[in-house]
Amino acid sequence: MRRASRFAAITLLLAAMSTAQSCHHLDDDRIPPAAVNISFHTMAEWNTYGVGGALQWKRFIIDERIPANYPYTALTYTGFGGILLVADAFGTPLAYDLACPYECRRNVRVGINTETMLAECPVCHSTYDVFSLYGHPVSGPSADRGYGMRRYYVGPGRAGEYMNVSF
């Protein structure tokens, strides 16, 4: 009898843990898919336009020519709302779509709050940890709903480029 009740208690505990974990699902697919291709052909180009050290960031928005002197080409694409390129605490480059996943509009873009070092939406005020939690929401309506930032690939280029950001 004791064994059966212990088994039932363990089964209930595992079911409760499974249910609790399923409530913490991250939806990082809210931003519509859009082409992404930013190439850094040389190490010098990466050192100028990329992120070379921990907690650095750059924004790429082709329609607004940000950064102004980046050599955009006909094959450059910057996603739905633009690209936020960051370096995490270890200096590893990461890339996200600039569009707020709660607002889902091209022109509502997150920016880095230099006091908190979180990405923050100017409209809904949701915040996201892009430096250590891979774009997970920290506060605001996105945190309430589990809306994370869309991530993109950052790594060695395929056609001889030094680094490439792509979808």
Image (tube, grey):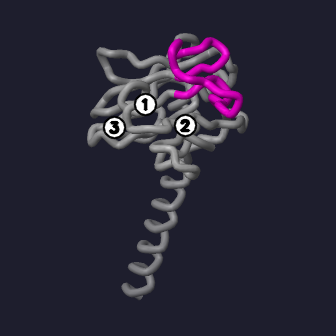
SS at mark 2 in the image:
strand
Would you place residue 167 above or below residue 101 in this image? below
Please say whether residue 69 is one of the residues in the magenta stretch.
yes
Q: Secondary structure at mark 1?
A: helix
Q: Position of residue 26 (x, y in %)?
A: 55, 44
Question: Going from the N terminus, do you reach mark 1 or mark 2 first?
Answer: 2
Q: Quadrant of the C terminus?
A: top right
Q: What residue do we see at 42% from left, 73% from top?
A: 10
Indicate the position of residue 151 as horizontal and vertical percent values. Answer: 54, 40
For residue 3, side relative to residue 99 (left or right): left
Which portion, as a residue range, is magenta? 60-83
Can I make out residue 148 in this image?
A: no
Q: Would residue 146 be seen by someone viewing this image from the given angle?
A: yes
What separation in Å lies between label 1 and label 2 (alpha carbons)?
Answer: 9 Å
Residue 88's disc is 3
The reply to whether the C-beta atoms of the residues labelled 1 and 2 are less than 8 Å apart is: no
